[in-house]
Image (cartoon, rainbow, N blue to C red):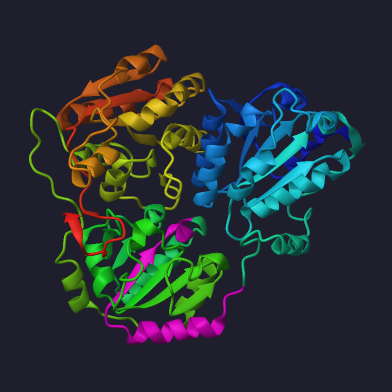
Amino acid sequence: MRLNGSDILINCLLEQDVNTVFGYPGGAILNVYDALYKRSDEIRHILTAHEQGASHAADGYARSTGKVGVCLATSGPGATNLTTGIATAYMDSSPVVFITCNVNSNLIGRDSFQEVDIVGCTLPVTKCNYVVHDVNNLADTIREAFAVAKSGRPGPVLIDIQKNVTAAETEYEFKNVSEHFNFGKLAKLRERNHPSIYSPEPDLNSIDELVRMLEESERPLLICGGGVVRARADREFRELASKLDSPVAITVMGGGAFPGNSDLKTGMIGMHGSQASNMACDACDLLVAVGCRFSDRVTLNPDSFASQAKIVQIDIDASEIDKNIKSDLHIIGDAKKILKLLLERIKFKKDNTLWKNYVFSFKVETEYDDPEDGQFTPKEILSAAADVLPKRTIVTTDVGQHQMWAIQHFKFSYPGQLITSGGFGTMGFGLGAAIGAQIGNPDRTVLHVTGDGSFRMNCNELATEQYYKLPIITLVFNNSCLGMVRQWQHLIYHERYSQTTLDRGPDFAKLAEAYGLHGRKVTDAEELRKILKQTKNTRSDGKGWVIDCQINIDEMVRPMVGGNSHIANFMID
């Protein structure tokens, strides 16, 4: 059949089983929105308050559902407003296809109204990107983009379509998602240095060598990274830990891939890692990291990291091997496949009681003093949420102290339950991500954990939450400051609190009410529990909640190890 570019785009989305997109219209993309209007019974469009909110919502949708997220924006500022969300998805390996439309081909390079080279802007933070000049190439470009986004190490892909292409016509044939793309074409993309287009076949000799190392080890430590979440390899990882009777440390991105209530879990590892995790890392004789890129927040000082151990790195992306930490053995491939092959070869079951007794002689969670002046501790807030809300509640976070507290004290139990910006550290990520997670999981409770600094950045998305009747619960850890930065100023900069005190509005409870949502301010755990119970009773009315939790301005994330320090050298414990 003969269709114009806009109708081809919509049909290609339907080929990919896309039924939800997030975005914001503008002049250059109007043809696409007109086509979308005519197919609104097949594809639901979520209009956010800002393009950045749309980018985070598509990301949250992807992480929570395991599907590819889709985000639309117009040219110029519409496109550039996506860049923070694109970088966030890139750093955390989240599969999102971003579709922008640019000015007409004859206006490119003339500094036309709302013209920008969005491909040039996003080249460093996309897995792959495309410019479509010719309508005849549009369908295959879209199909390839989806294949790239979800294959190998997932990640964001951007397609920039010139406006005249959306109006031009060509022949189009609908193709099923299972048959429409030949992955052999991706060989050319490998030549263009796009990492992890394929899922490499694991080296069996290396797996056999790892089995030997595991059998000989007396002090093993497993690190559960974000790759376990992305591969949905949680069952295999849990079985491996059980067979080895090994302590398990969790990275920020690994939350949910190993049961939070397991007796083998040591807690988070790294800068704000638990004493148990960091001390185990320092004393283990074999460290096996699955889907972990050994970022600076995990390793701190690479020269002294796990200095007594043989280090094994399992990752789908060859470019991550030995990038930050030199490994003694590495296996490249899909985490789920590698773990299955490993489990088939392990014919022993270990008892590491003595080693575990040593590791768990150190604290797994932070202990708090009794609260003062009616304010309550982060653990009290999160314990109340965990006790009252359903066990499978999806939790999104912004970035800062509240993020670390949530990961330390909330017991995540399945992949996609924790949605946080780990690599890029994007303040303002959480509410958009919560919107995407709630849209993708309408029957689940979604909890958005944020701080007063992060929440200010994108609280305009409360309008989106209200309009689409999304019963999201926002917990604001309100300490009237940029808490994490202030903590560094306290510990390192001799209490010179330069521009981190937020002694200003708004009143978050009243702000919520202004948007037509429920708003409350609380100062103790008992009151918080009562309000959280109310959220369950009012869920059916589709009105979200903003709960402003007053905490002490000097509350800190503990433990903490300074940057580039030895992992067991705690500044505060």
Please tell me which residue is depicted at 44% across the width and 52% down the height of the picture. Answer: 415
The magenta region covers 201-229
Q: Position of residue 199 (x, y in %)?
A: 62, 66
Q: Quadrant of the N terminus?
A: top right
Q: Say above or below: 330 vs 121.
A: below
Please tell me which residue is depicted at 50% across the width and 69% down the height of the picture. Answer: 321
Please tell me which residue is depicted at 44% across the width and 40% down the height of the picture. Answer: 426
Q: Position of residue 533 (x, y in %)?
A: 26, 29
Question: Hey, which quadrant is residue 101 in on the image?
Answer: top right
Q: Say above or below: 177 vs 301.
A: above
Residue 258 visible in this rendered orientation of the protein: no
Marker count (numbered): 0
Of 344 and 271, which appears nearest the observer? 271
Q: Position of residue 498 (x, y in %)?
A: 27, 33
Q: Is residue 532 left or right of residue 158?
A: left
Question: Hey, which quadrant is residue 565 in on the image?
Answer: bottom left
Please tell me which residue is depicted at 46% across the width and 63% down the height of the picture. Answer: 291
Q: Say above or below: 556 vs 359.
A: above
Q: Position of residue 43 (x, y in %)?
A: 67, 32
Of 30 and 238, which appears nearest the observer? 30
Q: Is residue 341 left or right of residue 118?
A: left
- Residue furthest to the top in view is 514
Of 523 and 403, which appears nearest the observer? 403
Q: Quadrant of the C terminus?
A: bottom left
Question: Is 210 a magenta residue?
Answer: yes
Question: Is 370 a magenta residue?
Answer: no
Residue 303 visible in this rendered orientation of the protein: yes
Q: Say above or below: 485 vs 340.
A: above
